[in-house]
Amino acid sequence: MMTEEQTTQSANPLFQQVEAALDTLRPYLMADGGSVRLLDITDEMVVELELLGACETCPMSTMTLRAGIEQVVKRSVPEISRVEAVSSNG
């Protein structure tokens, strides 16, 4: 069941654009046993993601985040200033 905050976020066009950009990357991440979850877009236009599966512990995750995920998201949604990996627990 979605929380009220998740429902509000998913109705946000910017949130939907970032999700669409991430959807283009997910098959590649899944091929290596990983994925990402969009947690938030801050007022400063920072996308906060949670790395999932193999991406959580992969030594290449920082490079994947900067050279892959961040570039695709910023190209698709120019309003975004940066992409950060955060823990959904913290």
Image: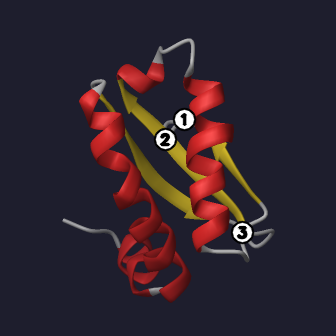
Disc nearest the viewer among 1 and 2: 2
Is disc 1 in contact with disc 2, using a CB cutoff of under 8 Å?
yes
* Quadrant where the image shows the C terminus: top right
Q: Is residue 16 left or right of residue 32?
A: right
Residue on which the image places disc 1:
87
The kind of residue tagged 2 is: Glu
Relative vertical location of residue 20 with respect to residue 56 in this rendering, above or below = below
Is disc 1 in contact with disc 3, using a CB cutoff of under 8 Å?
no
| Residue 18 screen position, x and y as percent | 51, 69
Residue on which the image places disc 2:
50
Q: Distance between the Cα atoms at labels 1 and 3?
A: 20 Å
Residue in the picture at 26% in, 68% down: 2
Q: Distance between the Cα atoms at labels 2 and 3?
A: 17 Å
Of callouts 1 and 2, the N-terminal one: 2
| Residue 63 screen position, x and y as percent | 65, 28
Of callouts 2 and 3, the N-terminal one: 2
Q: Is residue 10 left or right of residue 60?
A: left
- Label 2: element kind: strand
Crowd tier of the residue under label 3, counting other residues whose Cα lies within 10 Å: few below 14, some 14–19, many 20 or above: some
